[in-house]
Amino acid sequence: MQIRPVHCWWLGVAMFTPSILTWGLFLGLSVYKGWVAFPFDRYGITHLYLPLLAAVVGFIVPLFCLHRFRTASRRATWCVFFGYLAVMLAWGIVDIRQEHYQMGGHRYPNDVLTDGHRYYFHSYFTWYFLPYRWIERGLTS
């Protein structure tokens, strides 16, 4: 079997498969346990629906392109693939800069008064592969 440019789309599938599985587990467990609280307000849209949409788009677009670009030229395949990467990376950076995390909390080695807000953690179901601490801090800090 020969590797062709269309096979680059498997990278997108591989990056977003854990996101889809995590979202599926979270949503399934929420419905099963009766924790169904899917609000349609600003917080629900930015922390739930848009990251879920990003995971679905990040997973479905490469699958579609795997089928669609089988006979496309090398140049067209690479242009669309790098466009996809740029859009998804920009979406992830904006999402993380706005701190639209799905789960967060603090781990205090000592106590709250001593440690303050330094030992926090965030979990992004969709953007697990991006270095969120660097992105949240930004380039100026």
Image (tube, rainbow, N blue to C red):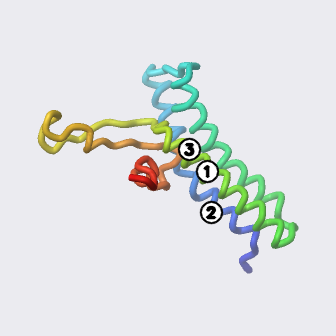
Instruction: Judge left or right: residue 119 versus residue 12.
Output: left
Q: Secondary structure at mark 3?
A: helix
Residue at which label 2 appears? 11
- Counting from the top left corner in percent of width and height, residue 16 is at 58, 52
Residue 140 versus residue 8: which sits nearer the camera? Answer: 140
Instruction: Name the residue rendered at 42%, 54% in the picture.
Output: 134
Q: Amino acid at mark 2?
A: Leu
Q: Secondary structure at mark 1?
A: helix
Residue at which label 1 appears? 90
Instruction: Name the residue rendered at 46%, 43% in the picture.
Output: 124
- Counting from the top left corner in percent of width and height, residue 13 is at 63, 56
The dot on residue 80 is none
- Counting from the top left corner in percent of width and height, residue 10 is at 66, 63
Q: Secondary structure at mark 2?
A: helix
Q: Amino acid at mark 3?
A: Val
Q: CA distance from mark 2 to mark 3?
A: 21 Å
Name above or below for residue 102 compared with residue 13: above
Foreground: disc 2 or disc 3: 3
The dot on residue 94 is 3
Q: CA distance from mark 2 to mark 1?
A: 17 Å
Instruction: Judge left or right: residue 60 versus residue 117.
Output: right
Residue 12 quadrant = bottom right
**Tag 1–tag 3 contact (CB < 8 Å):** yes
Foreground: disc 2 or disc 1: 1
